[in-house]
Image (cartoon, rainbow, N blue to C red):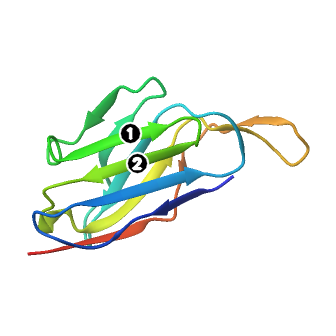
């Protein structure tokens, strides 16, 4: 099972970028999915989270600019980032909580710890 993030890159202030994170494997269920970010010299922080039922929550710094969504059929979470600011520059990580899947022996496995993607760089120029 892997989380593969994509969609990062260079954006301009006021512009938009869209991140995607797909969970590979034979997935049984995923609880919350989210996006975190880590800027140079700073701690990783929560950007947005979405429950399996679609409830969302955002960091104050991105409210009304970013939108998190998910496609449960595709086991994919998205982050639409609008009105980008230079301070949004960071490595963005996707996250999945309580991930349950079938292993290679077709046994159900549920992880008791969060799963993380590899990170995708977002750089916003002024």
Identify the secondary structure beneath mark 1. strand
At 16% across and 47% down in the image, what residue appears?
A: 65
Is residue 39 positioned above or below 67 on the image? below
> Split into 4 quadrants, where in the image is the C terminus?
bottom left
Q: Quadrant of residue 55?
A: top left
Marks 1/2: CA–CA distance:
5 Å
- Counting from the top left corner in percent of width and height, residue 93 is at 42, 58
Q: Residues within 10 Å of mark 2 (few under 14, many from 20)?
A: many
Q: Is residue 46 left or right of residue 126?
A: right
Callouts 1 and 2 close, C-beta under 8 Å:
yes
Q: Is residue 96 left or right of residue 104?
A: left
- Looking at the image, tell me whether mark 1 or mark 2 is earlier in sequence order: 1
- Counting from the top left corner in percent of width and height, residue 24 is at 66, 52
- Counting from the top left corner in percent of width and height, residue 111 is at 66, 39
- Counting from the top left corner in percent of width and height, residue 101 is at 73, 39
Q: Residue furthest right?
A: 105
Q: Quadrant of residue 81?
A: bottom left
At 41% across and 67% down in the image, what residue appears?
A: 120
Disc 2 target residue: 78
Disc 1 target residue: 69
Q: Is residue 39 left or right of residue 108?
A: left
């Amino acid at each position: 099972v892997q989380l593969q993030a994509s969609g990062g890159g260079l954006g301009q202030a006021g512009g938009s970028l869209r991140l995607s994170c797909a969970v590979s494997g034979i997935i049984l269920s995923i609880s919350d999915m989210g996006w975190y970010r880590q800027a140079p010299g700073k701690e990783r922080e929560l950007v947005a989270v979405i429950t399996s039922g679609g409830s969302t929550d955002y960091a104050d710094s991105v409210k009304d600019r970013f939108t998190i969504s998910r496609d449960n059929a595709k086991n994919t979470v998205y982050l639409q980032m609008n009105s980008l600011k230079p301070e949004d520059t960071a490595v963005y990580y996707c996250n999945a909580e309580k991930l349950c899947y079938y292993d290679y022996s077709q046994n159900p496995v549920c992880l008791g710890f969060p799963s993380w993607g590899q990170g995708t760089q977002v750089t916003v120029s002024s």
